[in-house]
Amino acid sequence: MKAKHQRLVLVVLALIAIVGAGLLATYALRNQASYFYLPEQMLADPPQVGQAVRLGGMVERGSLKTDADGVTLRFNVTGNESSRVPVRFSGIAPDLFVEGSGVVAEGRLEADGTFVADNLLAKHDENYVPKELEGMTQQQASRMAEETTVGLE
């Protein structure tokens, strides 16, 4: 076989291997994909019961309740004023999780329309300041940042 034909065979085999690896990865990850829904999308076209999805929106003011067990939270996630999805979460909520804040809940929808969250991701606005830096001036915060990074260099 000529060198030109050998190179052609190697290129074809490499392309087949790359396409095969891509198809295998797609097949393996098809159940791991987590789709993102807004409340109005979840109400209009809900995912299958038990399918892993993410629900994002705002925690409705006045809807946050803690069950008697002290660990289970119930609240509504809203998008626009008319759409709200009830959510149940058992676990420790993030520090930034409060009414009126943004949230992304990872979990699944139950048959009764309640979203059962396995994980909560709290979002903060662009004006977020860590508790340690509250009340400090810009100069004091800069000085504190410099002091904490001196030993890292």
Image (cartoon, rainbow, N blue to C red):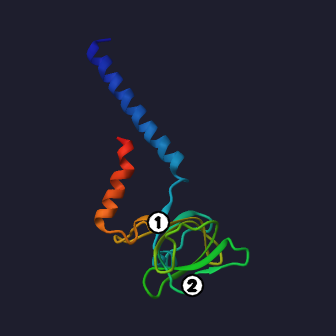
| Labelled disc at residue 5 | none
Pick the front one: 135 or 69: 135
Q: Which residue is drawn at 58% across and 81% down?
A: 64
Tell me where residue 108 appears, x and y as whole percent. Answer: 59, 67
Tell me where residue 122 appears, x and y as whole percent. Answer: 48, 68
- What secondary structure is marked by label 2? loop
Q: Which of marks 2 and 1 is nearer the N terminus?
A: 1
**145 shown above or below 108:** above
Residue at the disc numbered 1: 36
Q: Quadrant of residue 135?
A: bottom left
The amino acid pointed to by label 2 is Ser
Residue at the disc numbered 2: 63
Count numbered badges in the picture: 2
Q: Most extreme residue toward the right, as rendered? A: 69
| Mark pair 2, 1: CA separation | 22 Å
**Mark 2: few/some/many CA within 10 Å (<14, 14-19, 20+):** some
**147 shown above or below 135:** above
Quadrant containing the C terminus is: top left
Q: Residue at x 40, y 66 (%)?
A: 133
- Dot in front, 2 or 1: 2
Q: Residue at x 40, y 70 (%)?
A: 134
Q: Which residue is drawn at 28% across and 13% down?
A: 3
Horizontally, residue 145 falls left or right of residue 70, namely left
Pick the front one: 112 or 66: 66
Horizontally, residue 33 falls left or right of residue 71, namely left
- What secondary structure is marked by label 1? strand
Q: Most extreme residue toward the top, as rendered? A: 1
The amino acid pointed to by label 1 is Phe
Tell me where residue 24 appears, x and y as whole percent. Answer: 49, 41
